[in-house]
Amino acid sequence: MASAAQLQETLRLKLDYEELTNCMRCGFCLPHCPTFKETGVEAESPRGRLALMKAAVDGVLEPGAGFEDQMYHCLGCRACEPACPADVKYGHLIEQTRDAIEEHTTQHRWWIKPIRSLVFKQLFPSQKRMKLLGYSLRFYQQSGLQKLAQGTGLMKMFPAHMAEMEAILPEASGKGVIERLGTFVPAKGAKVGTVGMFRGCLMDVLFTQTNVHTVELLSEAGFDVVIPEAQNCCGALHAHSGETSQAKELAKRNIEAFQASGVDYIVSNAGGCGAILMEYDHLLHDEPAWNESSAWFAKRVKDLSAILVERGHKLPFAEAGSQPEVSVTYQDSCHLRNVMKGGTAPRQLLNSASSCSFIEMKDAGSCCGSAGIYNLTQPEMAGQLLEKKMTNANATNARYLVTSNPGCLLQMKLGIAKHGQQGKMEAVHIADFLHERLAQSTH
């Protein structure tokens, strides 16, 4: 357990107290919070967690192990924010709280801190190490080692949720989008603008083809696409996990890389990445030297679907009937929907695709349980949320389950596998789905 007095003092320094006191305790957030809906416990709601934060800062509550656990039981989906009449920035407050906790906690087992340091400080910030990870995973998958590990029962040595996730990992690659396409891809037809593509870290290792399809869609829609080689991890996982200082360093590198590229917009194809990118101005708000640059960056961030709908030429989909008609439903990325306000554009694109029958899923905007690494750190709650999501997805009888975030995509693949829906339903990224529906004459 952290030293309560030390944590309390750090919370006082880090938490935006004015923002904290904006909560009116109205309860409008309660029906939108996944953990509260599952448990019915006040402390599992945004209002409850804000009350705990304030009590700790005010000296009414000693922030011990229970306090820490509750702050990490939050998914960080931010579904509470659009529902809040006081516009409380709950996401910022939960990140500030976790940042304070990580300075003092002693709850981690002895091996957790070295792993956190390896992942957050050595692996994600380094594109070279991420590529090495991609090569290693690809060798594991293609050499027969993966089949051996699964066939001999070796994976049973790991927790069940980790073994399940390992089984549905997509084919990895050590060659990212730049190795495939270069750092510049010109617009097809009349140019409408220049965009910088944010390639991500895990996206470029596990979903390289999705990144390639993203660039090709942007080019098809009339954009010159620049892919700055100097960019790195967005810092979302760092910010959500209490590693704020590291998130800031990653943000600064990305700002410099994209400012030097001369782009009109910065495009993300991952809801989790896009949300942190468009909040770089908040992330760096206490560093005056970066205020202007971070504001320049944040206002240019666009989700792939949004920029295609708002700025691009209409994609040349094949005429209806030229391809087999398919049924499709959509699973919202929490951060795309709640932070980037991007729930409409993906649906517009899916409705405009040729021979596509769109079916709206019940509670499509509720969290699927992925939430970054939440499905690894909080498997029980993540599993409960996934079961609800799959009940609603299965009810649509859709052939394709489309989403706009890699974490959601993996979680949906896991849900399909656990429900025995392989062959009946396929989880796909929206970039891959749209790319496949383009007219054959464009390729």
Image: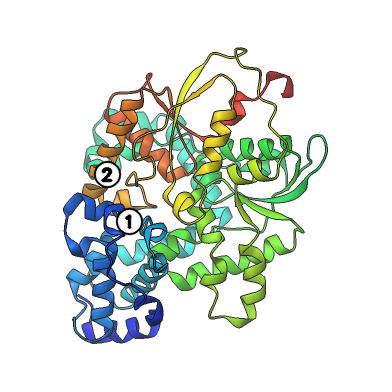
Is the residue 82 above or below the residue 38 in the image?
Answer: below
Q: Are marks 1 and 2 in contact (CB under 8 Å)?
A: yes
Mark 2: secondary structure: helix
Tell me which residue sits at (31%, 33%) in the image.
Answer: 392
Q: Disc 1 designates what residue?
A: 75
Quadrant in which the N terminus appears: bottom left
Q: Amino acid at mark 1?
A: Leu
Q: Please tell me which of labels 1 and 2 falls first in the chain.
A: 1
Q: Quadrant of residue 146?
A: top left
Q: Nearer the viewer, residue 178 or 414?
A: 414
* Residue sitting at the far right: 190
Tell me which residue sits at (65%, 17%) in the image.
Answer: 319
Q: Residue 280: x, y in percent? A: 56, 67
Mark 1: secondary structure: loop
- Left or right: 399 in relation to 227: left
Q: Residue 399: x, y in percent? A: 42, 22
Q: In the drawing, what numbered circle is on residue 385?
A: 2
- Left or right: 119 in relation to 50: right
